[in-house]
């Protein structure tokens, strides 16, 4: 075997190994669902106005620690992330589409919902179109270490049978 041939083999082998590694590391290449979080230009005032209006119109109850339970119709839904919870507690309908606007109210958080992840930078909002397949529940989890009770920062979205 000539030196040149050996080099070619190493080059081809190395490239193939790199491609396999890159392929394995990138879920997006393996046919993940199309929808994903987008960053959205929505200032804090507009977000709060949307959140307050949603809670005022569609609140169906409250948890023991004062978290509103909200059952919004398909369309815009507002979720605030803050140390160390997501609010409100959501009840959505299976098979309906919701535009989820998520924004941090204090420090850097992250969110994972329905297999999608976004970083929640204070002052910005993240947008995800969500169509629960339920009925059942979906979890929302903070994916960015945000202090003492970060591991408790999770919420369950209740998914109701389509009406
Ligand atoms: Cu957090």
Image (spheres, rainbow, N blue to C red):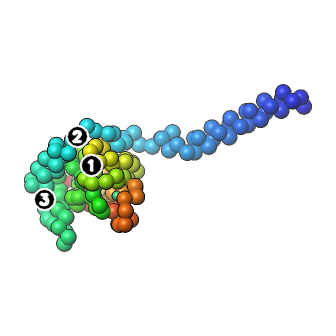
Which residue corresponds to the image point at 83% horizontal and 32% vertical from the top-left? 6
Disc 3 Cβ-to-ligand 1 distance below 8 Å: no
Image: 136 above or below 128? below
Number of the label disc, if any, that sits on residue 103: 1
**How far apart are the alpha carbons under marks 3 and 2?**
23 Å
From the viewer's perspective, tell me whether residue 57 is left or right of residue 6: left
> Which residue carries the number 3 mark?
59
Q: Earlier in the sequence, mark 1 or mark 2?
A: 2
Which residue corresponds to the image point at 30% horizontal and 51% vertical from the top-left? 132
Classed neighbour count for the residue bearing mark 2: other residues with Cα under 10 Å, few (<14), some (14–19), many (≥20): some
Q: Is residue 115 visible?
A: yes
Q: Earlier in the sequence, mark 3 or mark 2?
A: 2
From the viewer's perspective, tell me whether residue 28 is left or right of residue 109: right
- For the residues labelled 1 and 2, say whether their Cβ atoms are less than 8 Å apart: yes
> Which residue carries the number 2 mark?
42
Q: Nearer the viewer, mark 3 or mark 2?
A: 2
Image: 41 above or below 79? above
Image: 80 above or below 25? below
Point out residue 99 in the picture as x, y percentages from the top left corner: 25, 44
Q: Give whichever of 144, 34 is nearer the camera.
A: 144
Q: Give whichever of 111, 147 is nearer the camera.
A: 147
Tag 1, which secondary structure? strand
Of all residues, the one furthest to the bottom in this rendering is 64
Q: Earlier in the sequence, mark 1 or mark 3?
A: 3
Q: Quadrant of ligand 1?
A: bottom left
């Amino acid at each position: 075997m000539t030196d040149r041939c050996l080099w070619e083999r190493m080059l081809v082998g190395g490239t193939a190994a790199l491609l396999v590694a890159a392929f394995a590391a990138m879920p997006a290449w393996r046919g993940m669902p199309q929808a994903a979080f987008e960053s959205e230009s929505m200032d804090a005032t507009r977000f709060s106005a949307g959140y307050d209006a949603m809670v005022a119109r569609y609140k169906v109850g409250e948890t023991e620690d004062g978290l509103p339970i909200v059952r919004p119709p398909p369309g815009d839904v507002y979720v605030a992330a803050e140390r160390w919870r997501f609010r409100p507690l959501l009840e959505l309908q299976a098979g309906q589409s919701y535009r989820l606007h998520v924004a941090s109210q204090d420090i850097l958080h992250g969110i994972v919902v329905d297999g999608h992840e976004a970083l929640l930078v204070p002052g910005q909002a993240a947008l995800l179109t969500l169509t629960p397949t339920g009925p059942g529940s979906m979890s929302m989890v903070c994916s960015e270490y945000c202090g003492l009770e970060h591991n408790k920062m999770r919420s369950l979205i209740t998914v109701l049978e389509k009406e």
